Amino acid sequence: MEIVFKSTVNAENYKSRIYLVNSLEDAANCSLSEFEQKMLSAKVNQTRFIKIETPDYTSYVVILKNDSDDESCETLRKLGNEVYNSAQGKNEKDVVIANISCLPNVVYPFLEGFLLSQYSFSKYSKKLEINSFENIVCTGKDCGDINELNTIIKGVFVTRNLINEPNNVCTAEYFAQQAEELFAGTEAQVFVRDKKWIENEKMGGLLAVNKGSVLPPYFVHVVWNPQKNNSQPIVLVGKGIVFDAGGLSLKPNQFMETMKSDMSGAATVLGTMKIVAETKLPVHIEALIPLTDNRPGENAMALGDIITMHNGKTVEILNADAEGRLILADALSYAASLNPKLTIDVATLTGAANQAVGEHAAVYFATAEKDDCEALEKTSFKEWEPLVRFPLWNYYNELISSNMADMKNTGGQYGGAVSAAKFLQQYVSYSWIHLDIAGSAYFKSKWSYKGVGATGFGVRLLYMFLKQLA
Ligand code: BES
Ligand code: MN
Ligand code: ZN
């Protein structure tokens, strides 16, 4: 799939033509025949797009309107998906999208929805393949930054592919290799740290979770420093549990089914870094990704175990399924050595976050500056990957206090997303934002432009936020 903007293209040379209009009156400029114009006026008011089929070509007239508030933009993404579904499957490899009369701020989200819909994870079954377009040519009025859009969509697909890849292929080692391959040929550096390195760093959380696995843990560090200076980096941290069986606190089948996706935070960070490297964003950004599976192997960490973390703090393990906070805590503690300006971690951390805001939003916590939080929230609504802020009140600390160690790895019955965040906060000594994307990262059934399986939630948001810091 490739989308380009060409100012000098004649839509009439294409068999699939999509005309974007502000209102129906503008359809007069869509190079439709008299017959088509008649069909158009007959069908109008039924939907926001009208399909006109002739033996030689198919035209779509799409009425975008000029509402560009955040929720209207999300409606446009979904409209993009509807038009895509209608246009796809004709074995047609080329399509032209002619912007007749719309502003770029409504065309762009429409194109986002259209392009995001082209994804399918079909490497394991031919029957899942879709006839996506190979060449998408935009023409007419300004459509926004199409090259950048192309790069963003590909980054989202990188994330979705990594998440959808099952654990019998996507082990910690595989993920680390993918990271190396992804940035080969870019100016980003990738360091893949092995178990020896992790032991030397005394990352007791990552090592404890890994004890139930027969495969070694990894720790991936990606450096993007285009100006090659000592500026303070933005650090991204991603939860990389390549499969979460729950350890000895084994999950019931129903909750384990989707747990190949428990590395969604890691994949989100990597996809974002890919876009950063491809667009050569002039900001110093580093990514840290702790990787392991969480299984109930013979030597798995036991309940009651007391472990020592990277920063020297001790943790009493009371639930082997609260593993994400253990590997993230080590990574967050290690992040301090990079002297970060701001650190953002992304994790499918708690079912409680999913319960609280549903599957189209995520929960966030922050000790970061007000300006950064406001910018992040604003971007989250613009991209419609909405974030809801939850508190870090100190009174919640009692939820994680232990009689045996500095803290325990579980909270009480309620407020699970908060106790997890309070746990992480014990390992943070800098400006910090924590995103809990459990529920929004992976869908069991198909939904509009996000499809089924991995959604890529958070990639557009993070990239757009980072871009503003440039
Ligand atoms: N990976 C899960 C959280 C999760 C749940 C992600 C649903 C995506 C969808 C996490 O490791 C977990 O098991 N959390 C437990 C924590 C509890 C044991 C304190 C949870 O939320 O139940
Ligand atoms: Mn778990
Ligand atoms: Zn988990």
Image (cartoon, helix red, strand yellow):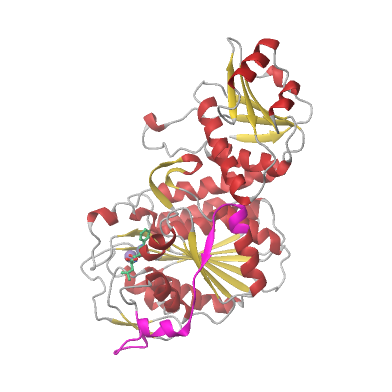
Residue 273, quarter of the rendered image: bottom right
- Residue 109 against residue 233 in the figure, above or below: above
Residue drawn at (65%, 14%), measured in percent from left and top?
38
Check the image and name the residue furthest to the left. Answer: 298
Q: Is residue 76 magenta?
A: no
Residue drawn at (57%, 46%), measured in percent from left and top?
74
- Residue 132 against residue 212 in the figure, above or below: above
Q: Is residue 405 magenta?
A: yes
Report the quarter where the N terminus lies.
Answer: top right
Q: On the rendered structure, is 408 left or right of 45?
A: left
Total labels drawn: 0
Decide which of 11, 211 is in the foreground and name it.
11
- Residue 25 against residue 459 in the figure, above or below: above
Decide which of 132, 360 is in the foreground and name it.
360
The answer to whether any part of residue 15 appears in the image is no
Report the quarter where the C terminus lies.
Answer: bottom right
Ligand 1 location (quadrant): bottom left
Q: On the rendered structure, is 186 left or right of 408?
A: right
Q: On the rendered structure, is 327 left or right of 131?
A: left
Q: Position of residue 177 (x, y in %)?
A: 47, 55
- Residue 448 against residue 181 in the figure, above or below: above
Residue 2, quarter of the rendered image: top right
**Residue span colored magenta:** 379-408
The answer to whether any part of residue 18 appears in the image is yes
